[in-house]
């Protein structure tokens, strides 16, 4: 009983009542189990808000904020973080940018003072920008050498061409190289303000500890610039599309097959998530793993899943066969999708997926940091409070007919895009022959082309 009391949670939502901080939101959960405080400060608007030909400006802006304020150098910030027993990083996503921190609870007050300074008075020193750009470009070039990273990057750029979802969260080499301090300052002015700010905290602290922190940011960053919403994407393939991202001397092919997905608020999502689990979502008993790996030995791994946001992104399949097995593996994957749409889940698959998802659901919110992340997702993507906690109960209510009807309505195997990191001279003709396509209809792009 004592342990239960010690770990009991006092979860609350605070909408600050002061005039200065009325726009910002604070979500706080107390947990005294460990002398740690987890903090996420997020701002709505991410890489999707990067201006054309400035892809990467949001990511560089966030990273440079940690490299100096108007009164502190990068070295001074790093030393202070070490002294406080804290770590601080920044992440850029399509629809938000977030500063994430962990700090010893006894040092929370001085840490919040430092964090407020980082958010409200970054220096954007030109010399630090040039150093960061070189590091960033080097990391992007390293990604080109990793085929699994490369297929994800190039696939989205090709599928969503002309749409904000085509922008890489980490930017493009040619855009990064041209960024200036003025570019970063403009993006900072647009995104970093209290109207778009969410502060989410969990751990060994009190709700009142964050009031002055919130008020300080609200006073200093009170610009109420509202970002544009991401438009719906309407240019998805009207027929089967194949794109080879041509990379010399490949002996193995990275394959991604995708179609338009659903948004977080789609009422079919729970049913589709359950069905996806059975198809390729995380088990050696999934259809993809059984058919592509166990029975045929074409690939070590195979999976499927949704990429989610406020607007529909993609549902995607991925696997990595040897070159000689690639055409047959692609054909079989498409056959499996078609069969899944037309015949649906079996009762055994449905029951196993429901049991597995229900039993594992508790692990998605069993720590303060996980619950903090859930709150962030719920607020960024306009989901009901408790959306993640109630996942298991929603799954339990689903029927086999609901799951299979969702599949029939959703899957479009005849309109999917197939992307491959492969050597086109080896793969192109055989893929065309296997899929019954004209070879000239297969697109080839240089893997280095942005």
Image (tube, rainbow, N blue to C red):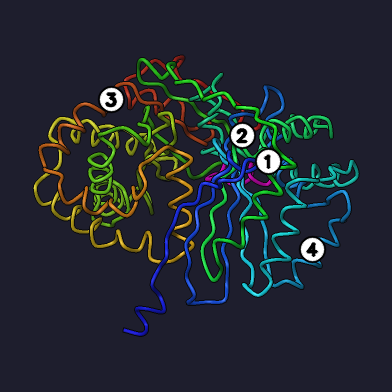
Segment tinted magenta in the rendering: 142-149
Q: Which residue is mark 1?
A: 59
Q: Is residue 384 visible?
A: yes
Q: Quadrant of the C terminus?
A: top right
Look at 84% across and 34% down and name the residue there. 181
**Residues at circles 1 and 2 in contact by the CB criterion of under 8 Å:** yes
**Nearer-N-terminus badge (2/3):** 2
Instruction: Residue 294: give x, y in percent of width and height.
Output: 27, 54
- x, y percentage for residue 258? 38, 32
Other residues around mark 3 within 10 Å, as few (<14) / some (14–19) / many (≥20): some
Cα separation between marks 2 and 3: 28 Å
Disc ID at residue 47: 2
How many numbered marks appear? Answer: 4
State the residue at coordinates (75%, 70%): 82
Q: Which mark is residue 412?
A: 3
> Would residue 257 be found to the left or right of residue 141 on screen?
left
For residue 411, above or below residue 86: above
Closer to the N terminus: mark 4 or mark 1?
1
- Dominant SS type (magenta): helix
Q: Magenta stretch containing residue 375, yes or no?
A: no
Residue sticking out furthest to the bottom: 2
Task: Say whether marks 2 and 3 touch (CB < 8 Å).
Answer: no
């Amino acid at each position: 009983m004592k342990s239960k009391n010690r770990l009991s949670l006092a979860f609350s939502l605070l909408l600050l009542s002061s005039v200065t901080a009325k726009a910002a939101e604070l979500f706080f959960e107390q947990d005294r189990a460990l002398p740690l405080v987890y903090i996420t400060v997020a701002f709505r608007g991410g890489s999707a808000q990067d201006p054309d030909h400035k892809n990467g400006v949001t990511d560089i802006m966030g990273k440079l904020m940690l490299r100096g304020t108007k009164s502190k150098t990068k070295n001074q910030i790093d030393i202070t973080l070490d002294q406080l027993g804290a770590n601080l990083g920044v992440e850029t996503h399509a629809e938000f940018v977030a500063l994430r921190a962990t700090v010893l609870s006894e040092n929370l007050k001085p840490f919040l003072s430092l964090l407020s300074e980082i958010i409200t008075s970054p220096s954007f020193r030109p010399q630090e920008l040039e150093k960061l750009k070189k590091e960033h470009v080097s990391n992007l070039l390293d990604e080109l050498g990793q085929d699994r990273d490369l297929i994800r990057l190039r696939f989205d750029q090709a599928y969503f061409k002309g749409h904000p979802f085509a922008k890489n969260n980490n930017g493009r080499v040619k855009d990064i190289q041209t960024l200036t301090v003025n570019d970063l300052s403009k993006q900072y002015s647009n995104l970093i303000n209290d109207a778009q700010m969410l502060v989410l905290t969990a751990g060994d602290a009190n709700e009142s500890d964050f009031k002055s922190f919130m008020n300080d940011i609200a006073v200093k960053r009170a610009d109420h610039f509202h970002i544009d919403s991401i438009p719906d994407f309407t240019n998805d393939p009207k027929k089967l599309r194949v794109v080879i991202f041509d990379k010399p001397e490949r002996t193995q092919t990275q394959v991604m097959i995708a179609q338009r997905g659903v948004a977080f608020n789609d009422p079919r999502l729970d049913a589709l998530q359950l069905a996806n689990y059975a198809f390729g979502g995380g088990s050696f008993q999934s259809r993809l793993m059984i058919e592509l790996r166990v029975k045929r030995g074409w690939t070590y791994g195979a999976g499927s899943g949704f990429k989610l946001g406020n607007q529909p992104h993609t549902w995607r399949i991925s696997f990595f066969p040897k070159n000689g097995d690639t055409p047959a593996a692609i054909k079989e994957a498409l056959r499996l999708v078609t069969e899944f749409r037309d015949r649906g889940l079996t009762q055994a698959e449905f029951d196993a997926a429901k049991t597995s998802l229900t039993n594992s659901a508790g692990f998605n919110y069993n720590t303060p940091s996980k619950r903090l992340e859930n709150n962030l997702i719920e607020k960024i993507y306009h989901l009901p409070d408790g959306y993640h906690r109630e996942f298991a109960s929603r799954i339990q209510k689903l029927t086999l007919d609901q799951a299979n009807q969702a599949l029939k309505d959703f899957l479009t195997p005849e309109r999917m895009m197939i992307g491959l990191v492969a050597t086109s001279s080896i793969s192109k003709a055989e893929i065309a022959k296997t899929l019954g396509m004209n070879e000239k209809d297969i697109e080839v792009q240089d893997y280095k082309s942005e």
